[in-house]
Image: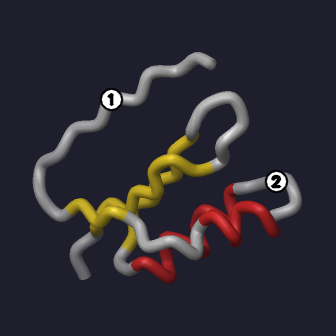
Amino acid sequence: MKLKLFVWEEVLTDYSHGIMFALAENVDQARKILIEKESEPTEFIEQELQDEPKIIESPEGFILWGGA
């Protein structure tokens, strides 16, 4: 199966928004990968992943500036 990039934007907000992304076959697998990567308690991550991600299947670029 062809892999897709799943992107959750404007998540994990503290002083500014964060981003989560996973390269996976489907959205369920993407969510599982991200939950398994997090070493902290995952309830907040699981809540953030309930929103539908942007799904990238063709060339795409992202720029996310850091800061407050």
Image position of 44 with respect to 20: above or below? below
Task: Say left or right for 59 vs 18.
Answer: left
Q: Position of residue 15 (x, y in %)?
A: 69, 29
Residue appearing at x 45%, y 50% in the figure? 9
Question: In the image as oriented, which residue stretches furthest toward the left?
Answer: 58
Q: Nearer the viewer, residue 18 or 31?
A: 18
Task: Say left or right for 36 vs 55.
Answer: right
- Report the residue marked by disc 1: 63
Assess disc 2: are there few (<14), some (14-19) or many (≥20) residues with their C-alpha within 10 Å of its C-alpha.
Answer: few
- Which label lies toward us, 1 or 2? 1
Residue appearing at x 69%, y 71% in the figure? 46
Quadrant location of the N terminus? bottom left
Q: Nearer the viewer, residue 12 or 60?
A: 12
Task: Say left or right for 6 vs 28.
Answer: left
Residue appearing at x 58%, y 17% in the figure? 67
Task: Say left or right for 2 vs 52.
Answer: left
Assess disc 1: are there few (<14), some (14-19) or many (≥20) residues with their C-alpha within 10 Å of its C-alpha.
Answer: few
Image position of 60 with respect to 65: above or below? below
Q: In terms of secondary structure, where does tag 2 sit?
A: loop
Instruction: Tally the numbered discs.
Output: 2
Question: In the image as oriented, which residue stretches furthest toward the top?
Answer: 67
Q: Position of residue 43 (x, y in %)?
A: 81, 68
- Report the residue marked by disc 2: 39
Q: Position of residue 66 (x, y in %)?
A: 53, 21
Residue appearing at x 68%, y 57% in the figure? 37
Q: Nearer the viewer, residue 16 or 56?
A: 16
**Separation (CA) of disc 1 from disc 2:** 26 Å
The amino acid type, in three-letter code, at marker 2 is Ser
Q: In terms of secondary structure, where does tag 1 sit?
A: loop
The amino acid type, in three-letter code, at marker 1 is Ile
